[in-house]
Amino acid sequence: MSDKRSGSAGAGVNTRLAHIGNDPRSYHGFVNPPVVHASTVLFPDVATMEARSQKYTYGTRATPTTDALCDAFNELEGSAGTILVPSGLAAISIPFLAYLSAGDHALIVDSVYAPCRHFCNTMLKRMGVEVEYYDPEIGAGIEALIRPNTRLVHTEAPGSNTFEMQDIRAISEAAHRHDCVVTMDNTWATPLFFRPLDFGVDVSIHATTKYPSGHSDIVMGSVSANARHWQRLEDTRIAMGICAAPDDSYQMLRGLRTMGIRLEHHQKSTLEIATWLEGHEEVARVLHPALPSFPGHEIWKRDFKGSTGVFSFVLSTDVGNARAKTHAFLDTLRYFGLGYSWGGYESLAVAVNLSDRTIRKGPEDGVVIRLQIGLEDVADLKQDLEAGFAAAATA
């Protein structure tokens, strides 16, 4: 890392985002790193080839473009190393494969990202790994669930769709007393609002498809680990032939430059809309950890530096009209698209299915609607939601 880049460590968030992951002096002064398309890399002689003693050896191992993005994530995460993978789910599954073997026991938070649960219930169980789900609010009490063969504790805060908060430091300390690896899906907060490794987590997982990309056009994941667990993670990636495309890596770096500014706008708009929804007659509850009314608010306030653009609310329904009201609400929306993922510039809405939960079941007072608040004007988004509520009320 050049003196210029290392000198940005103490600077503000947006200054750092503007300068991490690039070194213009290494590329003839060009501001952005080049996009290096590579499979074959040539060696100057047989001895170098046999020893693999040059920095780049093959396209799947690394390129200057992917290294630039990894350097950026390492600075943001405070990690010893980062791997880039083709999706957010791959960012979860590859660490699990790295640290778990047949006969091991893994503790997975019950409010986990649904595809993660599917991976655990299929691939991990088929491998002979015993999977147990735990209450997201268990805190230090997780120690009672740790067995002699427990090898990994997976966390996610806030939880997917229902946004339960976890006491990450307490869980990490309990897990480390038994030599367990602690992993965390930190996609919601990003390293700007929460740095997992600072709270005892060993491996920070991020669906960079979301906020680092910011434009709903790249699918990618990153995994950043501390020094103790980094090499095994990298070895697993190499053994599986997993890598990220150079064009995607370049665009991800470009997205990082504006992530801080975008998150400020997402946060401001989302809090305004979430607060407004709390007083709406068609809303039973708002599930957003930055709201004082939310059960996990104190943990969020203590540990997190901000909130992003995704939260949920409970649309008031009863058993008889739940489907009709939900469809009427969602189908009326104009600016909120009906689609999966989030973190882009556009607002999204989706009805949440919580049928896979084993401990934290879905609410009984209505249907959970997850919103992604994009970069549109708040007045327009409120008007759009109001139209949806009006349609739901007459369904």
Image (tube, rainbow, N blue to C red):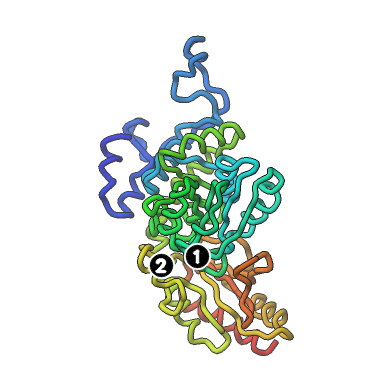
Q: Quadrant of residue 371?
A: bottom right
Give the residue at mark 2. 300
**Nearest the eye: 42 or 154:** 154
Residue 211, position as x, y percentages in the image? 48, 56
* 217 is higher (above) or lower (below) than 311: above
Q: Quick check: 4 left or right of 377?
A: left
**Nearest the eye: 386 or 3:** 3
Amino acid at the residue labelled 2: Trp
Residue 228, position as x, y percentages in the image? 43, 38
* 322 is higher (above) or lower (below) than 357: below
**Nearest the eye: 386 or 168:** 168
Q: Nearer the viewer, mark 1 or mark 2?
A: 1
Q: Residue at x 45, y 61 (%)?
A: 140
Q: Quick check: 242 left or right of 204?
A: right
Give the residue at mark 1. 138
Residue 91 can be seen in this image? no
Q: Residue at x 71, y 84 (%)?
A: 319
Amino acid at the residue labelled 1: Ile
Instruction: For mark 1, give the secondary structure.
Output: loop
Residue 73, position as x, y percentages in the image? 42, 45
Q: Quadrant of residue 23?
A: top left
Residue 154, position as x, y percentages in the image? 53, 53
Residue 379's disc number = none
Q: Quadrant of the C terminus?
A: bottom right
Give whichever of discs 1 and 2 has the lower sequence position: 1
Q: Quadrant of the N terminus?
A: top left
